[in-house]
Image: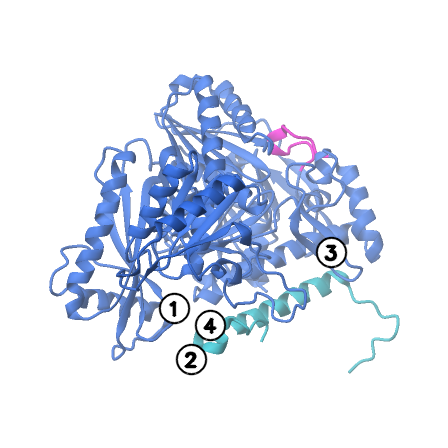
Amino acid sequence: MTDLGRNARIDPITLSIVWSKLMSIVEEMGGTLRRTAYSPAPQGCSTARGA
Amino acid sequence: MIRLAFDIGGTFTDIVLHDSLSGALHVAKTLTTPDDLARAVMTGLDAVLDETGWKSSDIDVLLHATTVATNAILERKGAKTALLTTEGFRDVLILGRQKRYETYDLYFRKPEPLTRRRHIYEVSERLDTDGSVITPIDIDGLDSVADRLLAEGIESAAIVFLHSYANADHERTAARHLAERVPGLVISASCDISPRIREYERSSTTLANAFVKPIMARYLDRLQETLGKRGFSAPLHVMQSNGGLVTPEIARDYPVRIVESGPAAGVLLARHIGRRESTEHVLTFDMGGTTAKLGVVDDGEPAITPAFEVDTIDSRRYSGLPLSTPAIELLEIGAGGGSIAATDGHTIQVGPQSAGANPGPICYGGGGDRPTVTDANLVLGYLDPGYFNGGAMTLDLESAEAGLRRTIADPLGLSLEDAAWGIHAVANANMERAMRVMSVEKGRDPRKYTLVAFGGAGPIHAARIARSLSIPRVIVPAAAGVGSAVGLLTAETRIDVTLTRTMALEASARKQIAAAYAELESLVAREAPRLGPAAPRLSRYAYLRQAGQGFEINVDLPAGPIDDGYADRVIEAFHATYERDYGYRDEASGVEAVDWCLAATFSEDTTGQLETKAVPREESGRIDGDRQVYLPEYGTQVSCRILDRATLARSDGLEGPAIIEDPESTILALPGDRLSMSERGDVIIAINARENG
C-alpha cells in the first residue's frame, strides 16, 4: 500500500461521496439480509444495520 | 370549469388555476407564512386571479394540500392531549418497539411521544382477542379519569383499549361518557381512527390524531372563513396521505389521514404524467425547499403502504412515530433547496436542517447566513440570479459566494467552485441513497423506470441522479415547480377503511371474509353521504402472510361475490403477489390474513381529470442565450445554452449540456443527454448512458 505521507490531503468532496457510497452499500447488504433472513434476530429486531 | 389547487409546503405555497375549457394552467408561488398559513394562500390566490381575470366567485372547486398536521407533530405544537388505555398497559406508548434505528449510539434517543406519561390514564376493562369481554369497563374509574382531565385542562383525548378492533363497545362507552363529563373535550377513539391489530402502532396513530385534531379544526375554520370573506363559494377538498380527496368535515375528524397530503399529491402528478407519456413504471422525485420526496408508481398506480412513520431521523425506519393509516409510499429526506451545508473540517454535510422560507438561503437576502443547496446551485451557474421564481425574486450571488467561502471553501481549503460543487454532489449522493432504498432495496430495477422530476429544485438535480442509478429517462412536466398542486387536479375523492380480522385462509373462511367486508362496506356507507352524491367504486385489498411469518404483504383481492370459491381466489392472489415480490411461490404453506381493507373512490365531474393543452408556442419573453456554468465533466466553467420550453418545442431536440428555464424551476441536462419535447408539452431527457456510473 502506498504511503500517503503525513501531509497528504484527502479531497473532502471525494471523501464525502465515497463515505455516502460505502454507507449505501452496507445498507443495501443489511436490507438484503433482513429480507432473506429466517432468523427473527435480524428480521424482527433490525439490529443488522450496517452489518 | 375553473379549478384552483393550492399546496402549502414548508418553504413555498404553490397555487395552480386550471381552466378546463382552454386547458391552460396558471401558476403562482409564494413564500409560506408559518405564523398564519392562510395569508400566503390568499397572496397566491390573488396573484392567479389577477393574472387570469377570473373572480373568486367564478371558481368551481378548491383543492387543498397542507403540511399543517405534519408541522404540528414535527414541532410538537399540538393540543394538550391525554391517552386513555387499558389498565396495566400504561407504558405501551412509552416503551414503543424494541427496534433501534442506530445500533451503536450510546446517546440513542427514542422518538419523543406526543403526550407525557402523567397524561396517560388507565381504565379497568379487558377484552379478549376475539372481542369477548373479560373485564367489563369500570364506569366509576372513567368518572375519576374525567375529573383528572378537567383538572389538568386536557383539550383532546385518545382512547385506545386492547383488542378494540374486535369489539368497539368499551371504547364507545368511554367516548360517550367522557363527552358527557368533560364539556368541549375533543375525542379520538382507536376503533374509528385505526381499528387494527398491534396496540403500540394503534396508540401512536390515535394519539397523533388527537394531538392535531383541535389544530386542524382551527386551521380549517380559519381557512374557510378567509376564503368565504374573499368571495369563494366553491366546495373545498382536502388531500389525504392515501392520494384521495375528502371534505373538510372528514379532514377535521381524521386529521392523521392528511399528514402526507402534499407529497401524496406529487405522486399523483407523476402517475398522471406516466399515463400520458405511456410509461407504467415511474420513480418520482419531488425536491422542494425543505425536503426531497421520493415515490413510486408501479403498473400505473402509486404504491400504497399500510403504515408509515412521521418525524423520522434521517428517514430511518423506527426512528419516528408510526402511523397506521394507508398512505402512498414515500420516502422523504432532508435534502431540499434550503438544506443547509456544513463541514466538520473533513467532509461536507448537507441537511437535514433547512433554512426554510425564513430566513431562507443566503441568496434570498432574508437574513439567512448559512449556505444552502440553492446557494451552491446559484454559484455553479445553474440558477439565474435575475430569473428565480419567474423573476419574482432576485437572488444575491455575491452574498452567496461570500457565505460559501466563509463556511465551506476556506475551512476546507477548497476553491469556491469546488465548494459549491461539493454541496451539490453531496446533496445528490443523499438523494441517490434514498432512491436506492425506494428502488433497488424493494426489488425495483431502476433501469426499467422513468424518473419524473418536479418541485422547485428537482429538475436541476434529476439528470445527475438518474445517471448514478442508471435510470434511462427523465420527464419534467409543465408547471413542474408546483407539481403537488398540479397533482391535486388529478385526484379523486377516496377513502380507505381497514379492519383487523386475523384468520387462517381456508375454504371455510368464506363466512368470516364476507362478514369483514360487510362491516367495511357499512363503514363506507356511513361516510359516503359526507363525500359526495356518486356511488363509490369499491376495490378490496388485504394484508396477508404465510402462516408463521411476522410481516404481511399487500394483496389486491378479486372483486365479485364472496362465494364458496372466494377464499381460494384470495389464496391464489396471495401466491401470485408473493411470487412477484420475492420470485417464488410456496403453495404448501398456509396463508393467514391480518387486515382487510376496502378503498372507496368517488368519481365526480369536478375532480380527477386534467386535460392540459400542450406547451404555448409563443415566446416567453426570455431571451435564449448562454451562461457560464460549472460542470465537473469539463473540470471548469463552460458556456452552457439557456433556453425556454417554447424554443425547445420548436427544435428537433438538442444535446446537453443545456438549461431550460421555466418560471418556477430550472431543468439541467448534462453533457451527452438528449433533450426533447413531447407532444403533451413534457420535457424528456434521454440520459447519456455512457456516462452512467
The structure residue drawn at horizontal position 75% and vertical position 44%, both measured from the top left corner, is B370
Residue B316 left/right relative to B53? right
Name the residue that disc number 1 marks.
B551
| Colour that chain B carries in the picture | blue
**Gap between marks 1 and 4, in whole Å?**
9 Å
For the image shown, how many numbered marks are present on the structure? 4
Label whose residue precedes the other's in the sequence (2 or 4): 2
Farthest left residue in view: B564
Is the Cβ of the residue at disc 3 closer than 8 Å to that at disc 1? no
Q: Nearer the viewer, mark 3 or mark 4?
A: 4
Please tell me whether mark 4 sits on a helix, a strand or a loop.
helix
The amino acid marked with disc number 2 is Tyr
Please tell me whether mark 1 sits on a helix, a strand or a loop.
loop
Image coords of residue B216 (percent x, y): 47, 36
Residue B194 in view of the camera: yes
Please tell me whether mark 3 sits on a helix, a strand or a loop.
loop
User: Relative to B331, does residue B601 appear above or below in the rendering?
Assistant: above
**Gap between marks 3 and 1, in whole Å?**
49 Å
User: Relative to A5, does residue B249 appear above or below in the rendering?
Assistant: above
Local packing at callout 1 (Cα closer than 10 Å; few below 14, some 14-19, many 20+) is few
Image coords of residue B645 (percent x, y): 52, 36
Image coords of residue A43 (percent x, y): 47, 74
Q: Which residues are magenta?
A: B384-395
Q: Which mark is residue A44?
A: 4
The amino acid marked with disc number 1 is Phe
Protein chain holding label 4:
A
- Rendered image quadrant of residue B504: bottom left
Name the residue that disc number 3 marks.
B635
Please tell me whether mark 2 sits on a helix, a strand or a loop.
loop
Residue B565 is inside the magenta segment: no
Residue B394 is inside the magenta segment: yes
